[in-house]
Image (cartoon, grey):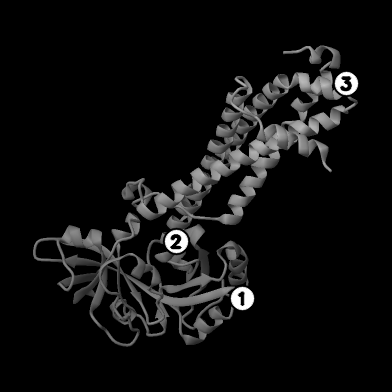
Amino acid sequence: MNLPLFIARRIYRHHDAKRKVSSPAIAIAIAGIAVGLAVMIISISVVLGFKHTVQNKVIGFGSHIMVTNFMSQMSSSDYPIQMDDSMMRVVQQISGVKHVERYVYKQGILKTDSDFLGVMFKGVGPEFDSTFIKENLVEGSVPTFSDNTSSNKILISKIMADKLHMKLGQRVFAYFIDKSGVRLRRFTIQGIYQTNLNQYDETICFADLYTINKLNNWETDQASGAEIMVNDFNKLDEVESLFIEHINKTVDRYGETYSSQTVRESNPQIFNWLDLLDMNVWIIIALMVIVASVTMISGLLIIILEYTSMIGVMKAMGSLNSTIRHIFLWFAAFVIGRGLIIGNLIGLTLLILQKEFQIVKLDPSIYYIKAVPVEFNIPLFVLINVFTFVICLLVLIGPSFFISHISPTKSIRYE
């Protein structure tokens, strides 16, 4: 039989409100742990949700890795690179690659009877993964993009539609100006999307690869590049090293040099900003653990003082200091456990409410999203619970040695 555990359980169960000193202290300790844990769970959930939501938006407009012409990375101009079926197979066969698709860029001007707007046309082919765009579609549908015929259908953003006062199904003229002069194309708006990532929403509209390639006067086997999705984003650098080894610095039949670039390298400002959020989480966790630990230390000392007479009796009966210390550490474990249960209930309830009803809103022009996103990571939540329990219990070992300084003769008369 575990005597310290048995006595601690009896003390905890029969500890009532008549103890005017320790009862409030225990309540404060439980509240400190509960609030601290709830804040940690919410902070981790919000940061993970925010990082992954913004990250997925950036990746949705591009990919994990982009293979382009080396000259395109060195300048603001767009240079073609050979991207035929054989090259696509070479890229697809690299370990860790999940999906490959071609794209072509062309600057143009959308014009209505009263307005005009400079945009970047992104031509995509039949292999285009439209999952991201469909998730952010406001009206209409995603056109069926082709690499051998022109559908004259485009997909524009809501920002473009609002600026040009255009509606779904409306026809719009597009002007392209280059060394060949001015060329005109007429497109029909088949879909309108909105991602709230303004740096893309303000510039990117989608058309079929065949049309944009022809407007660039490129060969049918040429493109601006290829966008590659990997199986595991956490292994992005490992896959990129394979591209550096097998693709980079190779030359196509037109004499152009291949080069690869990760999404982190092409959008450093966004990913650096997201990485800074991790530091904020660690600071919040540290502060909350300190608060919970301090309240538990105060509560334990008050409880020891209130049970001084019992400690004296136990010492007089031959109990060791270590046995008595274990009693109060077990008692503290019950208090910490209760605080963790309450903290989990508070934190998870608030997260569920936010996920279902999006109570806390954000300005999408600043944060790229309309409401605070949350992400449930159960293994991480369990780890935070275990970490908080262990740390709070460890910091109580030192204060528990206060018991060894209590004299049996004096403590028995203590009230």
Direction from residue 179 to residue 67 in the image, left or right: right
Q: Which mark is residue 316?
A: 3
Would you say residue 403 is visible in this rendering?
Answer: yes
Specify which label sits upstream in the sequence, 1 or 2: 2
Direction from residue 171 to residue 292 in the image, left or right: right
* Residue 159 horizontal/vertical position (percent): 24, 58
- Residue closer to the observer: 310 or 253: 310
Specify which label sits upstream in the sequence, 2 or 3: 2
Q: Residue at x 59, y 38 (%)?
A: 339
* Residue 371 horizontal/vertical position (percent): 36, 50
Tell me whether the residue at label 2 lies in contact with that at label 3, contact meaning CB atoms closer than 8 angstroms.
no
From the image, state whether disc 2 or disc 3 is nearer to you.
3
Q: Residue at x 20, y 70 (%)?
A: 175
Residue 191, compared with residue 339, is above or below; it is: below
Mark 1 sits on what residue?
Answer: 95
Name the image quarter holding the C terminus: top right
Callout 3 crowding tier (Cα within 10 Å): few <14, some 14–19, many ≥20: some
The image quadrant that residue 221 belongs to is: bottom left
Mark 2 sits on what residue?
Answer: 56
* Residue 292 horizontal/vertical position (percent): 61, 33
Name the image quarter holding the N terminus: top right
Q: CA distance from mark 1 to mark 3?
A: 72 Å
Residue 238, compared with residue 17, is above or below; it is: below
| Circle 1 SS class | loop
Q: CA distance from mark 2 to mark 3?
A: 67 Å
Residue 36, compared with residue 255, is above or below; it is: above
Q: Amino acid at mark 2?
A: Asn
Callout 2 crowding tier (Cα within 10 Å): few <14, some 14–19, many ≥20: some
Q: Residue at x 17, y 73 (%)?
A: 169
| Circle 2 SS class | helix
Q: Residue at x 38, y 82 (%)?
A: 126
* Residue 184 horizontal/vertical position (percent): 18, 75
